[in-house]
Image (tube, grey):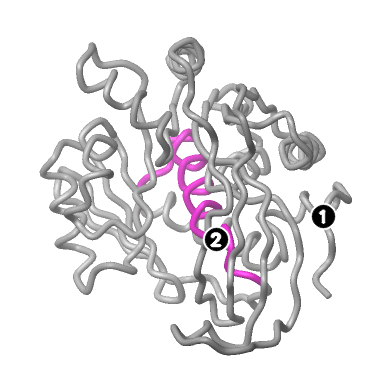
């Protein structure tokens, strides 16, 4: 189908983050360390996916909990400036992280604030919005837990895509997302055998599993047994934040146009370059003029 006609609804985190660049991650002992630079910018896995889906021309809406605070305003302004439609739901505070990073892509994420619990009315409204889309992307979050539990206990509905991130094959929190999803993504941070990890996911019900492998590219395994691989596209890396979300978005957008597995992987790899080449989740965030530059 034409991408402009494809409706994708996302549910999950959008945050305002403080990114701190270090020459090495801190050792677990008291010490002093100088940062190479820092910046404040838009974050959140769902925000990243929404930015890159919009970049591909997909009709996308992001459903997120945002506080009536300065951070919530910054998140909404950054997404609006990038052309992403945001449906904000009330929270006592906006999600906020401090990310300690190195130039090679290592990262420690410190959660400084998380959204308050969503009301039943909020969950009902988000669930209804997802049901009206062609594809629902449900990212890891407490609201997401409520949504996927409804899917598991009710009738089958719109296809769910979910991102398990650094799933190790056993984490209990991920289990309902995995069992409710039609398509699952993950990275290989917690496994030495991505093929076995993907197969263990498919054994729980999804029709397709995709595992990103950083500089080694990505692999995919379908329930039919079809396998596919793609190499990473060469790029001068500026920042690794959001590369996995960009890959997800590129893959999903290609699938909506009817591309096969190889074509979807190639599209994901190309879209990852857009994130890797920017200091932000997407260059459109910087264009909006709502971030502070790396010093």
Provide the major secondary structure of the magenta segment. Answer: helix
- Image location (x, y in percent) of residue 151: 27, 20
| Residue at horizontal 70 percent and vertical 33 percent from the top | 84
Residue 156, position in %: x, y? 25, 16
As drawn, the residue found furthest toward the left would be: 203
Q: Quadrant of residue 170?
A: bottom left
Report which quarter residue 175 is drawn in.
Answer: top left
Which residue lies under the disc numbered 2?
A: 243
As measured in the structure, the alpha-carbon distance from the residue carrying label 1 to the one carrying label 2 is 19 Å
Q: Residue at x 73, y 55 (%)?
A: 41
As drawn, the label of residue 291 is 1
Within the magenta stretch, is there residue 247?
yes
Relative depth, front residue between 255 and 182: 182
Q: What are the residue bounds of the magenta stretch?
A: 239-261
Relative to 126, is 59 on the left or the right? Answer: right
Residue shown at 62% from the left, 49% from the top: 96
Residue 18: horizontal and vertical position, in percent?
69, 61
In the displayed orientation, state which residue is furthest to the front: 30
Q: Quadrant of residue 98?
A: bottom right
Question: Residue at 38% of width from left, 55% of height from top?
Answer: 165
Task: Bin the neighbour count of mark 2 within 10 Å (Cα to Cα): few under 14, some 14-19, many 20 and up.
Answer: many
| Local secondary structure at mark 2 | helix
Answer left or right for 173 relative to 45: left
């Amino acid at each position: 189908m034409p991408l402009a006609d494809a409706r994708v609804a996302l549910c999950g985190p959008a945050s305002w983050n403080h990114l701190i660049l270090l020459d090495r991650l801190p050792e677990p002992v008291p010490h002093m360390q100088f940062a190479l630079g820092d910046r404040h910018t838009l974050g959140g896995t769902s925000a990243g996916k929404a930015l890159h889906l919009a970049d591909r021309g997909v009709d996308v809406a992001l459903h997120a909990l945002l506080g009536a605070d300065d951070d919530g305003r910054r998140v909404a302004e950054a997404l609006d400036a990038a052309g992403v439609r945001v449906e904000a739901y009330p929270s006592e505070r906006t999600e906020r992280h401090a990310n300690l990073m190195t130039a090679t892509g290592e990262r420690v994420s410190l959660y400084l604030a998380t959204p308050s619990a969503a009301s039943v009315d909020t969950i009902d409204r988000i669930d209804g919005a997802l049901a009206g889309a062609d594809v629902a992307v449900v990212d890891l979050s407490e609201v997401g837990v409520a949504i996927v539990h409804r899917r598991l206990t009710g009738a089958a509905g719109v296809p769910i895509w979910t991102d398990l991130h650094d799933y190790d094959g056993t984490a209990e929190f991920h289990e309902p997302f995995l069992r409710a999803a039609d398509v699952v993504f993950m990275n290989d941070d917690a496994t030495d055998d991505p093929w076995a990890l993907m197969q263990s996911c498919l054994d729980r019900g999804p029709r397709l599993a995709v595992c990103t492998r950083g500089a080694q590219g990505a692999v995919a395994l379908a329930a039919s047994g079809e396998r596919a691989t793609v190499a990473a596209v060469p790029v001068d890396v500026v920042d690794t934040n959001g590369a996995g979300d960009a890959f997800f978005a590129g893959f999903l957008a290609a699938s909506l146009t009817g591309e096969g597995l190889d074509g979807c992987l190639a599209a994901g790899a190309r879209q990852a370059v857009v994130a890797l080449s920017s200091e932000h989740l997407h260059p459109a965030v910087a264009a909006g003029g709502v971030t502070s530059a790396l010093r």
